[in-house]
Image (tube, grey):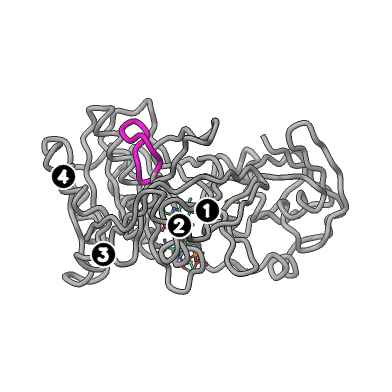
Amino acid sequence: MTSEQASGATESAGREAIGAVDVTDGFVPVPIRTVTRETVDAVSLTLDLASVAEGFDYRAGQFITVSVPIGAQWYRRCYSMSSAPSVDKGLRITVKRSIGGPVSNWINDNARAGDVLNVRAPEGRFVLDPLSDAPLVALAGGSGITPILSLIRTALHTTDRRLKLLYANRDRDSIIFRDELDDLAELFGDRLEVGHHLDVDSGLLTRDQIVSVLDGCAGADFYICGPRKFMDVAEEAVIDADPRSVHLERFETAEIPPPEEVSSVATPTTEEVTIRLGRQKVTVAYRRGSTLLQTARSAGLRAPSSCETGSCGTCMARLRIGSARMVNNDVLDDDEVAEGWVLTCQSLPTSPTVHVSYE
Ligand SMILES: Cc1cc2nc3c(=O)[nH]c(=O)nc-3n(C[C@H](O)[C@H](O)[C@H](O)COP(=O)(O)OP(=O)(O)OC[C@H]3O[C@@H](n4cnc5c(N)ncnc54)[C@H](O)[C@@H]3O)c2cc1C
Ligand code: FES
């Protein structure tokens, strides 16, 4: 089902804008140009960037951070662009309801054309390697199609690469961008192969089912995005496919224990933390149980962050002295960790002194 729910600023005339304005931490208020219902539980918003001076250029696969007030609280969430920068003029995000989730449901229920959304500039590392001309294999589950669609359309329009997509959903009606994918498969039939997996027909996608569609995909660049269980199965399945590279974007993380709980089990006493951010450098006493990000904030620094679950990489910084333990890390690979990179939102210091630098 694809229908224009509302478009044009006049339709929301008389309604109060959904968002009060959040101008902290680089957020800017941007009008919503159109709201399109994609499925019963997913909605796309295109944003009108005319008023935004600069900084909103993006690469396929990246995300923006949205800040919304619900009740008395502000919430921040990441949303990947489902638009393709080289093809589409505007910027589009697509939000699928999470059961019990405040922000995804709020956006699905409240977003109207003409309302203002507080957003922060695009970022993210789930992007195409400009030096690669290897075939591209994409595995998407549910809302994970958003960055994947952007990557696929970009690769189709700007390269000669061959592409294969396996897209898993509950049933036919929950396939986001079904028509758009059909159109692409028709237009680029010689280069794009699209396969759908529906749970109602053949149960939850298994490792063996994925392996069976990866025949002949050795040497490809793999991009995987979807719900947690899907990611786990897909990641396991591609190991045997002899990929050139594997790129993962996790929208949901495993249950993360609160830092206080983790720190009470392990770490020796950390006394002070030195943090460098741009031209600022501060040294503060360490408060037990605080992450490096919380420590930076308590020292008055406006340290970058977005998901705060270890999934997006916005808060990356480098340990120059000392050590820290990450409670969750869905972003950094082993080499980066060995080079001292940490996700500060997930890092608890484990040495008496720690020096960390946002670079
Ligand atoms: C880099 C990045 C990009 C993202 N891009 C998108 C996107 O393009 N579209 C989109 O809809 N979401 C995307 N997300 C997820 C999004 O940021 C929110 O987590 C999601 O909308 C749920 O927010 P919430 O406040 O409703 O619920 P939360 O309070 O955040 O979560 C409620 C519950 O739902 C689970 N959950 C969170 N996300 C999902 C999901 N996608 N599917 C199933 N369960 C989930 C959580 O683990 C939790 O148990 C992205 C996340 C990251 C880190
Ligand atoms: S803020 Fe997203 S990984 Fe730390």
What label does residue 311 carry, if any? 1
State the mark number for residue 251: 2
From the viewer's perspective, tell me whether residue 18 is left or right of residue 241: right
The mark nearer the N terminus, 2 or 4, is: 4
Left or right, 183 with respect to 147, comes to left
> Which mark is first along the chain, 2 or 3?
3
Q: Quick check: is the Cβ at mark 2 less than 8 Å away from ligand 1?
A: yes
Q: Is residue 278 above or below residue 65?
A: above
Q: Position of residue 189 (x, y in %)?
A: 11, 39
Is residue 89 covered in magenta?
yes
Determine which of the numbered discs, if any, sits on residue 183 in the image: 4
The residue range painted magenta reads 81-91
Q: Cβ–Cβ below 8 Å for labels 4 and 3?
A: no
Q: Is residue 270 above or below residue 135?
A: below
| Label 1 to label 3: alpha-carbon separation | 25 Å
The verdict on residue 261 being magenta is: no
Dot 1: element: loop
Q: Please identify the dominant SS of the magenta region.
A: loop
- Residue placed most toward the observer, 138 or 187: 187
Q: Amino acid at mark 3?
A: Ser
